[in-house]
Image (cartoon, helix red, strand yellow):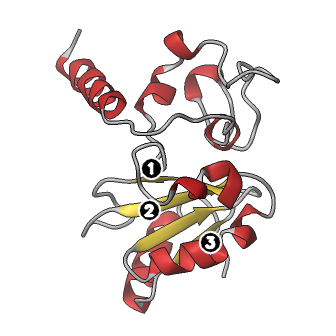
């Protein structure tokens, strides 16, 4: 195993060890995230998601990108009632990136159509502390922050990937 794969595996193991909550009936990540290994596009229901059961039928052998992804709610962020399928968005965080080189950006993916509107108050509170990039079910992105300079910087960076709506 090369050093890059070892580092990825170590990060995934560390994320798993600090999980504080179980998903329960929430399967928001199974529909919102794209999975390159499965040619699954963001917003599509995963072929391994089993109705009537708790989530993934191949959880122990799930693709690397699924193993590396990390739900903030499962790590203890936010209140217990703020589970992604209840509030309307599933959230993770970027590291230092092109979009915001001065720090992390919260990524809020719409868990279902109308999820952004349902989570608007929650997201606006977060936007007072950091930059929040909302990825809507239709693929558009919305940048929330109280700092106009940060908004302009992040919008310019992500316009290369997907449209930004006001």
Q: Which residue is mark 3?
A: 164
Is 148 placed above or below 121 here?
Answer: below
Marks 3 and 2, how far apart at CA: 16 Å
Residue 161 seen: no
- Do callouts 3 and 1 mark residues in contact (Cβ within 8 Å)? no
Rendering coords of residue 74 (x, y %): 47, 43
Earlier along the polypeptide chain: callout 3 or callout 1?
A: 1
Earlier along the polypeptide chain: callout 2 or callout 1?
A: 1
Rendering coords of residue 52 (x, y %): 81, 23
Image point (67%, 14%), residue name: 57
Rendering coords of residue 95 (x, y %): 31, 53
Q: Which residue is mark 1?
A: 72
Label 1 crowding class (10 Å Cα cut-off): few <14, some 14-19, many 20+?
Answer: some
Residue 100: name its quadrant.
bottom left
**Which SS class for mark 3?**
loop
Earlier along the polypeptide chain: callout 3 or callout 2?
A: 2
Is 137 placed above or below 51 here?
Answer: below
Residue 127 seen: yes
Is 42 placed above or below 83 here?
Answer: above
Looking at the picture, tell me which residue is in the foreground, 149 or 93.
Answer: 93
Foreground label between 3 and 2: 2
Looking at the picture, tell me which residue is in the foreground, 52 or 142.
Answer: 52
Q: Which residue is mark 2?
A: 106
Label 2 crowding class (10 Å Cα cut-off): few <14, some 14-19, many 20+?
Answer: many
Marks 3 and 1, how far apart at CA: 23 Å
**Which SS class for mark 2?**
strand
Foreground label between 2 and 1: 1
- Do callouts 2 and 1 mark residues in contact (Cβ within 8 Å)? yes
Image point (68%, 30%), residue name: 40
Label 3 crowding class (10 Å Cα cut-off): few <14, some 14-19, many 20+?
Answer: some
């Amino acid at each position: 195993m090369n050093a890059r794969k070892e580092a990825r595996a170590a990060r995934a193991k560390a994320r798993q060890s600090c999980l504080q909550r179980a998903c329960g009936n929430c399967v928001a990540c199974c529909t919102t995230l794209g999975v390159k290994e499965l040619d699954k596009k963001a917003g599509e229901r995963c072929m391994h998601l089993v109705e009537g059961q708790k989530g993934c039928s191949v959880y122990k052998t799930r693709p690397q990108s699924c193993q590396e992804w990390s739900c903030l709610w499962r790590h203890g962020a936010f209140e217990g009632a703020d589970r992604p399928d209840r509030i309307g968005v599933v959230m993770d965080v970027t590291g230092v990136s092109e979009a915001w080189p001065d720090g992390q950006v919260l990524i809020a993916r719409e868990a279902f159509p109308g999820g952004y509107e349902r989570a608007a108050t929650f997201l606006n509170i977060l936007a007072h502390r950091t930059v929040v990039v909302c990825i809507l079910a239709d693929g558009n992105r919305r940048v929330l922050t109280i700092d106009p300079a940060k908004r302009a910087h992040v919008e310019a960076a992500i316009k290369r990937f997907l449209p930004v709506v006001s």
